[in-house]
Image (cartoon, grey):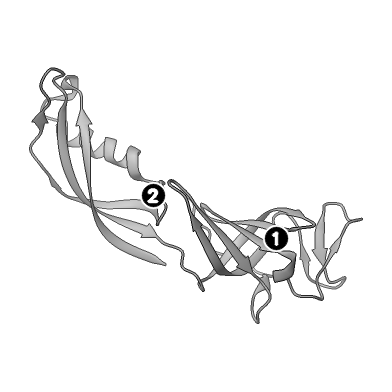
Amino acid sequence: MFFLYELERTISLHPSFFGPRVNERLQDKLLADVEGTCNGQYYIICVVDIIEISEGRVMPGTGIANYIVRYRTVVWRPFKGETVDAIVSSVNRMGVFADVGPLPIFVSTHLIPAEIKWDANATPPQYTDNADQVIEKGTHLRVKIIGLRSDVGSIFAIGSVKEDFLGYCLFGLLILIY
């Protein structure tokens, strides 16, 4: 789910960047540092605007100035029970790995409907019901998140395609690209 957060970050700036365009440099450095990152709770998609830039505090002995920047950002935080559209990145007999933008999801064989079976003789490797449903690399899936694990700079999810209206998607989907 997407949220609009107000965050704060301390940015250090070398004395060679002091001058009339210091605010532009701080904005560029903020965008480079935070957009597309994950803190273990959510992914920062983009910075909407900068609310406030404090006056710089010069650190004794180095000359580097620290600025506190308050900004608004769009974040994506996945939740348990949320349904998302994913693209399969790899398939093996243990299950399916898929990506929802920056979030990797694993769907175990136990969480794939019983009628869709592993086909070891197929090239490329795939799960199929020998009819119209084929799950292989590049397939679009609708997945329900049933579990999340957070690390310091990443999130990993476990998903299911065993419920109604989940699984193979015939049509394209919206993909987060940044």
- Residue 84: x %, y % from top left: 54, 68
| Image position of 39 (left or right of 17) | right
| Image position of 67 (left or right of 173) | left
Amino acid type of disc 2? Answer: Asn
Q: Which comes before the other along the chain, label 2 or label 1?
A: 2
Q: Name the residue tied to disc 2.
A: 39
Q: Nearer the viewer, mark 2 or mark 1?
A: 2
Instruction: Give the residue drawn at x 16%, y 33%.
Output: 66
Amino acid type of disc 1? Answer: Thr
- Quarter residue 9 falls in: top left
| Image position of 168 (left or right of 72) | right
Instruction: Give the residue drawn at x 61%, y 69%.
Output: 143
- Residue 77: x %, y % from top left: 41, 62
- Quarter residue 91 falls in: bottom right
Name the foreground residue: 102 vs 177.
102
Instruction: Give the residue drawn at x 31%, y 41%.
Output: 31
Q: Name the residue tied to disc 1.
A: 139
- Residue 157: x %, y % from top left: 55, 60
Q: Report the quarter where the N terminus lies.
A: bottom left
Give the spatial CA distance, label 2 vs label 1. 29 Å
Label 2 element class:
loop
| Residues packed near mark 1 inside 10 Å, few (<14), some (14 to 19) or many (20 plus) | many
**Extreme residue toward the right, this view:** 121
